[in-house]
Each structure stands twice: as C-alpha cells, then as structure tokens.
Image: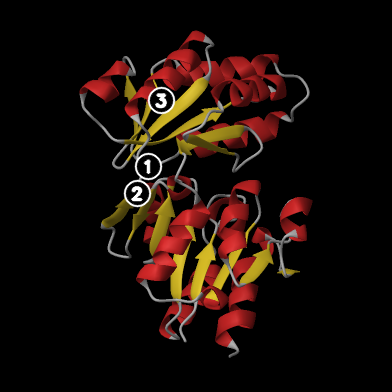
Amino acid sequence: MPKLVAIDLDGTFLNQNYTVSSLQADAVKKAQQKRAEIVIATGRADFDVRRLFQSEQLSTWVIGANGASTCDPEGYLIVSLPMETIYAKEIIAWLNEENYYYEIVTNNDIFITKKAKQLLQDEMDIVWNVDRNEMERTCERQLGQANLQEIDDYIDVFQAEKEIYKITIVSFDEERRRVAADTLSKKGLNLFSSADFNIEIVDGKASKGNALKKLAKKLDVKQEDIIAIGDSMNDLPMLEVAGTKVAMGNATDEVKQHCDYTTETNEKDGVAHMLEREILQK
C-alpha cells in the first residue's frame, strides 16, 4: 500500500534560514516516485508554502493554517475551515486594544495593520531576557511571508468579506503571551504554538490531526500507512493520527516522548533521513 507522509515545515523541513535544502527536496521527489503521498502540514498559509518550494520545484499536498485549509498538489482548495466572523472580530478588537502584533490569514493574503511592524520593534526594545538575534529572526520570518499586506484598519478585511483561516499573535514577552492565551481561549477555537513567540488561533474543528485524517480517508490510506514527522507542540495532533510517529532531533522533549523514534535535526536534513528509512530503502 502507498504511504501518506505528513511533514511539518518550520523546524522540520526548513532549515534555520527558512529554506529547503536540495537533499531534503530530492528525498521528497524520490519518495513521490515510489508512490508515497507527501503532505506538508504547517501553520503557514498554502501560498507561502508554494513560494518557499518554487526554487526546488516541489509539488505536494498542503495542510495550511494548522488544519484550516487543505490544498491539492496543484494548489486547489479542497477543505476550508474558516473562523466564525463573530470570534474573529472579538479577538482582533481585543488585540488592538492591548497593542499586540497580529496577522489575519486568509486564503489569498496575510494582513497586518500599518502600526504592526512598530509594535514588534517596541517589544524588541523593552524585552531584556530574550536573545536579540532570536527576536530579529522571528521578525524576519513573520515579515518575510508571501502576500503580506498592510491595511489601514482591520475592519477592511471584514468589509471585503474575506474568510479568515487563522489569527497569529507574536510577542516576545512571555507574560503577554500567557495573558493572550488565557483571555482568548474559548470553546469553538483552537490555540496552537508553532514557535517560541507565537500563538495561532483557528476554528475549533481545525488541527493538523483532523486535516490529516480527512486527507487519509480521501486517499484511501489506512492509519498504519501514515507517517508523521514534526518538532513542536502543534504537531502532536497529526502525530497522534499517524501509524509511525517521528520526532526531529531538534524537537521538544514532549514531542520526542510521543514518537516512535527521533531522526536528525532540521539542520542535518532529518526529513531526508526519515524518508530514506521509511520509504526509499523499502
């Protein structure tokens, strides 16, 4: 039976420069030649994944926005789980009042307000217990995403009747992240963290695990033939769905405890090593 391989992106398939190594890309292409179905499961938007893959000419399924969307290898949307508008409005109004940096992710764009970049800079200037280089790398990641648009007011998004797949909050202040998570947690929403400084809010039915289940059913793949690999807490739902669970060498200890084994780090092409073991040598 063909395998379905779910691969996280940041910290897993991408290196620290947010690029795909040729070795990782070649391993995916070879696995596809052996009839493996490859799905990238990420907090990023589908269009951002495809931008990152252009240089290596990769084409895969994409579970985007932590399970709020699923697109086929040609980029066509096949599953859509946008947030309820009432929740999105409440969240964004509170974030504005409390001066948080946030992003509104739709199927085609990522929106930030014109003061968003300054909010990140302000936090970098007052947070003393976080490495400056780490904060700058986080800013580079967030502000380097595809289709990032500045808007005058978040109301513009609702007036345009955009479907909102995810709201991302970034803060370098641990206490502010805790307050945001405590305040915004409610029934009907899922909150994930895919990196050290972010909170990602999606519809309550959206997760990498639920999206992977649906895709496996569509492709007629049994659970024992699903392989999943990741490094962060938002990967746990998809790891629980998989028959074979693999942790990156740079994964958190909790992720490693949930997995069957640990591969190399993202800097040492851990995904390629996993594909060699699970697909290419068989």
Within-10-Å neighbours for mark 2: few <14, some 14–19, many 20+ = some
Q: Residue at x 56, y 60 (%)?
A: 13
Q: Residue at x 59, y 43 (%)?
A: 194
- Specify the amino acid type for callout 3: Tyr
Of callouts 3 and 1, which one flags the residue occurring earlier in the amino acid sequence?
3
Spatial CA distance of label 3 from label 1 is 25 Å
- Foreground mark, 2 or 1? 2
In the image, which disc is placed on residue 87?
Answer: 3
For label 2, the residue is: 47
Q: Look at the image and tell me whether residue 167 can be seen.
A: yes
User: In the rendered structure, which disc, 2 or 1, sits on the residue that comes first in sequence?
Assistant: 2
Q: What is the crowding at mark 1: few (fewer than 14 residues within 10 Å), some, or many (at least 20)? A: some
Q: Position of residue 130 (x, y in %)?
A: 74, 28
Cβ atoms at labels 2 and 1 below 8 Å apart: yes
Q: Residue at x 56, y 85 (%)?
A: 280
Label 3 crowd (10 A; few <14 / some 14-19 / many >=20): some
Secondary element at tag 2: helix
Task: Name the foreground residue: 84 vs 260.
Answer: 84
Q: Please, what is the three-letter code of the amino acid marked with disc 1?
A: Ala
Mark nearest the camera among 3 and 1 is 3
Q: Residue furthest left?
A: 160
For marks 2 and 1, give the CA distance: 7 Å
Residue 33 picture location, percent across and down? 42, 84
Q: Residue 269 vs residue 164: left or right?
A: right
Q: Residue 125 location in percent, x, y?
A: 66, 16
Using the rendered view, name the quadrant where residue 98 is placed.
top right
Which quadrant holds the C terminus?
bottom right
Marker disc for residue 146: 1
**CA separation in Å, label 3 and label 2:** 24 Å
